[in-house]
Image (spheres, helix red, strand yellow):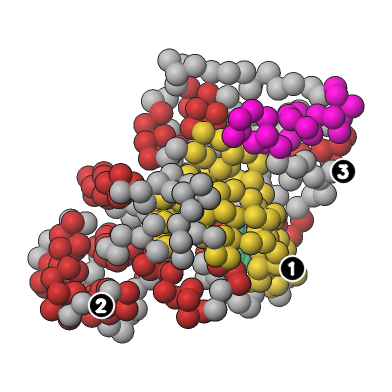
């Protein structure tokens, strides 16, 4: 596939995922649209259960089905629609061109095979090299992610290793084939601070070689360190996207403002998502209109009836809220403007 430098590497358009469960049907991902350019890192943030992991899994059709179904959308990667690809082609792309680091390492490692064999098979599926060369390559990558006694670990089964060790092996397997896109879902949660720093420095090194990153995290400090742009997700929808500066200094959506509320008082490096009063609604009962309406201090009648579109409010900065952009015309041009959303400067943060 020919690379078009102007086209985003990943272009997600109107992605929707439904789960059919014994308790009923619900949309875990609703009309999600965003893109990632070559060499760009995008952070996907939002409270637990908002659909971040389901979005990541749906991109390469890894949603367990049943109960999950991709109802709508297109996911262009280098111009090819991943949702329409033959599974053989998709398998070639997964691992070599798009790799994933999951929250749960055992979901990526086979319990039946030794680590060395899994790595060698993964390398040789995508690269035409001898077993000996593949073993040497695998050993190099295990060392790069800080695995001690590499030769011994190559002979181990995943269950013989600690959670942190499994996580590092999965990260080595995700990075070793120099993918164009790494999708990392809370990649370092199980790791100590030193190893976390080591892994992020490896990912940063890859970014310099034009690798793109979709990073799912609750840690806004990591977003600040690693990302160029941020997408904020709430109850199955993207509510705001923008550059780091847009999101940290000029947040527009009341949800983003709430999430970042505590950050100016902290060092941004240590910032976790703020807790907002109230709870994310159950996905079985998402309200009509804006999903944030019951927790929003600026809620208007229209928010309870209509779904706000994701509108551009300044160059490259989008928000899905009746207080902003073209959505304002839907409230007869008289929205109540949020008082917390004023521009903040870097010194405050
Ligand atoms: N296999 C599944 N079957 C049924 N429901 C599912 C399944 N996987 C996810 N869900 C539901 O889909 C919704 C979105 O889940 P998702 O895992 O994407 O949340 P998340 O934003 O990644 O949360 P967290 O930050 O806790 O990881 C949740 O309501 C979750 O319970
Ligand atoms: Mg998740």
Upstream in sequence: badge 2 or badge 1 = 1
- As for residue 330 lying within the magenta part, the answer is yes
Foreground tag (2 vs 3):
2
Residue at the image position 64 percent from the left and 28 percent from the top: 314
Cα separation between marks 2 and 3: 57 Å
Q: Are the residues tagged 2 and 3 within 8 Å (C-beta)? A: no
In the rendered structure, the answer to whether residue 117 lies left or right of residue 64 reads: left
Cα separation between marks 1 and 3: 21 Å
Say which quarter of the image contains residue 224: top left
Cα separation between marks 2 and 1: 45 Å
Secondary structure under the numbered disc 1 in the rendered image: strand
User: Does the numbered disc 3 mark a residue whose Cβ is under 8 Å from ligand 1?
Assistant: no
Q: Quadrant of the C terminus?
A: top left
For disc 1, the neighbor class at 10 Å (few under 14, some 14 to 19, many from 20) is some
Residue at the image position 48 percent from the left and 22 percent from the top: 264
Q: Mark 3 = which residue?
A: 305
In the rendered structure, the answer to whether residue 174 lies left or right of residue 137 reads: right
Nearest the viewer among 98 and 50 is 98
In the rendered structure, the answer to whether residue 224 lies left or right of residue 11 reads: left
Give residue 130's mark.
Answer: none
Specify start and end residues of the magenta stretch as a single range.
311-334
Secondary structure under the numbered disc 3 in the rendered image: helix
Say which quarter of the image contains residue 311: top right
Nearest the viewer among 234 and 161 is 234
**Does residue 28 lie above or below 253 as drawn?**
below
Upstream in sequence: badge 2 or badge 3 = 2
Q: Mark 2 = which residue?
A: 128
In the rendered structure, the answer to whether residue 213 lies left or right of residue 251 reads: left
Question: Percent from the top left, x then y, of residue 87?
Answer: 52, 79
Q: Mark 1 = which residue?
A: 25
């Amino acid at each position: 596939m020919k690379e078009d430098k102007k086209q985003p590497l990943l272009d997600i358009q109107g992605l929707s995922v439904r789960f059919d469960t014994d308790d009923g049907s619900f949309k875990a991902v609703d009309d999600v649209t965003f893109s990632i350019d070559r060499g760009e890192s995008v952070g996907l943030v939002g409270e637990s259960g908002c659909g971040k992991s389901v979005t990541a899994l749906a991109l390469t059709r890894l949603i367990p089905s049943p109960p999950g179904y991709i109802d709508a959308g297109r996911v262009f990667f280098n111009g090819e629609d991943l949702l329409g690809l033959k599974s053989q082609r998709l398998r070639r792309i997964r691992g070599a061109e798009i790799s994933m680091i999951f929250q749960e390492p055992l979901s990526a490692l086979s319990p039946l095979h030794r680590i060395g064999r899994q790595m060698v098979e993964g390398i040789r599926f995508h690269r035409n090299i001898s077993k000996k060369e593949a073993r040497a390559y695998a050993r190099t990558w295990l060392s790069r992610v800080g695995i001690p006694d590499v030769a011994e670990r190559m002979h181990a089964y995943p269950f013989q290793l600690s959670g942190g060790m499994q996580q590092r092996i999965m990260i080595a397997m995700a990075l070793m084939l120099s993918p164009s896109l790494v999708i990392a879902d809370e990649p370092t949660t199980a790791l100590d601070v030193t190893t976390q720093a080591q892994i992020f420095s490896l990912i940063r090194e890859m970014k310099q070689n034009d690798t793109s990153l979709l990073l799912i995290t609750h840690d806004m400090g990591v977003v600040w360190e690693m990302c160029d742009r941020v997408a904020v997700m709430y109850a199955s929808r993207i509510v705001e996207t923008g550059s780091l500066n847009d999101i940290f200094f000029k947040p527009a959506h009341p949800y983003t403002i709430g999430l970042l509320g505590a950050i100016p008082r902290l060092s941004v490096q240590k910032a976790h998502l703020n807790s907002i009063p109230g709870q994310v609604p159950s996905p079985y009962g998402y309200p009509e209109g804006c999903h944030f309406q019951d927790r929003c201090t600026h809620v208007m009648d229209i928010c309870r009836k209509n779904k706000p579109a994701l509108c551009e409010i300044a160059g490259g900065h989008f928000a899905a809220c009746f207080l902003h952009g073209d959505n304002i015309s839907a409230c007869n041009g008289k929205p109540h403007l949020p008082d917390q959303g004023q521009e903040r400067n870097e010194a405050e943060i």
